[in-house]
Amino acid sequence: MGNQLEGKSILTLLDLTPEEIRFLLDEAKDFKKNRERYIQSQPLKGKTLGMIFQKRSTRTRVSTETAMAELGGHALFLGKDDIQLGVNESLSDTAIVLGRMVSAVLARVFDHETVETLAKHANVPVINALSDQFHPLQGLADILTIEEHLGKLNNVNLAWIGDGNNVCHTLMIASIKMGMKMSVGTPIDYMPDNSVIEYCNSNASFSEQITVTNDPIAAVTDADVVVTDTFISMGQETETKMKLKKFDGFQVNQDLVKHASKDYIFMHCLPRHKEEVADDIIYGAHSVVFDEAENRLHTVAAVLNSIIQK
Ligand code: CP
Ligand code: NVA
């Protein structure tokens, strides 16, 4: 498949077909292998990306700014106190104005609706750089990492342990699109959103492709990939005390991973806290978290080079 993504917004992985995801993974591998060639050819010369961040970021900001620079373009950082983001101006007006100036917009937001409004009005492609519901750029880096380490995506057994959050939703959709089997283990009050579970149930290509349980051992049993994330996502800080109590028993540690496949890999989008994963797992022999972090650069480069209109 050639590039059919020019001009397209990516708010969730639902916006991409399996073929488009395959295309982006292959483009990311090409960028990773031939980075110097892209730096020389400057395919995004003269293009500017507006980057709105309502929340903190290390990986997303650094990977995106680096990718834009290496592809010959310019990234404009717009922090939450820098622009009129729904404070002194409507969000739709901000979106229209940005779209008259920049080639694409990337936004990290609290409410998913904010990226939807930006995409509706900007008239240029919009990329969701994390919302309360989804984190598609993380999902692309994660499946690239799985494919690199396990040599395939189809029929891989993925176990998610922890919060049924934005990254979990994204991997559930990725599993449906790319043929992985995913077992989600969360406390009863923190299961994935019903809308995502319903999407998975209606689109599964084999029975029990996605299972949701409140038993972390059941979720991790025979897993090829064990994934977790912070129990306290950005914006949930006031819930910390209550959540930590409810997540008791959901830490990824040696006791839990003894139920996984012998050669399992451990993944975490980072930043990491000790409550969700023990030191000897995240820094242990099965962990691929820093490959996963590096792949944020290669995948966002593929996304930017594909969606920005030349
Ligand atoms: N994984 C991730 O999105 O990291 P940042 O919050 O540092 O961007
Ligand atoms: N679920 C986390 C991911 C951070 C990259 C959050 O939303 O804060």
Image (cartoon, rainbow, N blue to C red):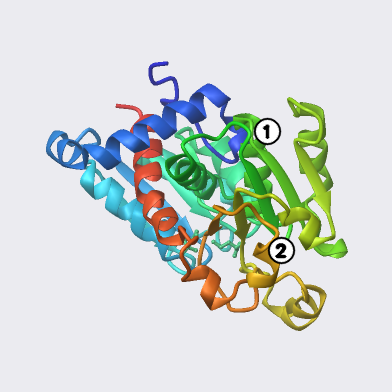
In the picture of the structure, the residue carrying the numbered disc 1 is 176
Q: Quadrant of the C terminus?
A: top left
Q: Give the farthest residue toward the bottom.
A: 241
Ligand 2 shows up in the quarter that is bottom right
3 in relation to 37, above or below: above
**Circle 2: residue type:** Gly
* 308 sits left or right of 119 in the view: left
Picture coordinates of residue 224, whole percent (x, y) = 60, 48
Numbered disc 1: secondary structure: helix
**Tag of residue 188:** none
Q: Nearer the viewer, residue 289 or 64?
A: 289
214 in relation to 139, above or below: below
Numbered disc 2: secondary structure: loop
In the picture of the structure, the residue carrying the numbered disc 2 is 162
**Circle 1: residue type:** Ile
* 243 sits left or right of 72 in the view: right
Picture coordinates of residue 261, whole percent (x, y) = 63, 52
107 in relation to 161, above or below: above
Q: Give the farthest residue toward the left.
A: 40
Q: Nearer the viewer, residue 229 or 310?
A: 229
Q: Earlier in the sequence, mark 2 or mark 1?
A: 2
Picture coordinates of residue 162, whole percent (x, y) = 71, 63
Q: Residue at x 59, y 31 (%)?
A: 154
Q: Quadrant of the N terminus?
A: top left
| Camera sees residue 133 | no
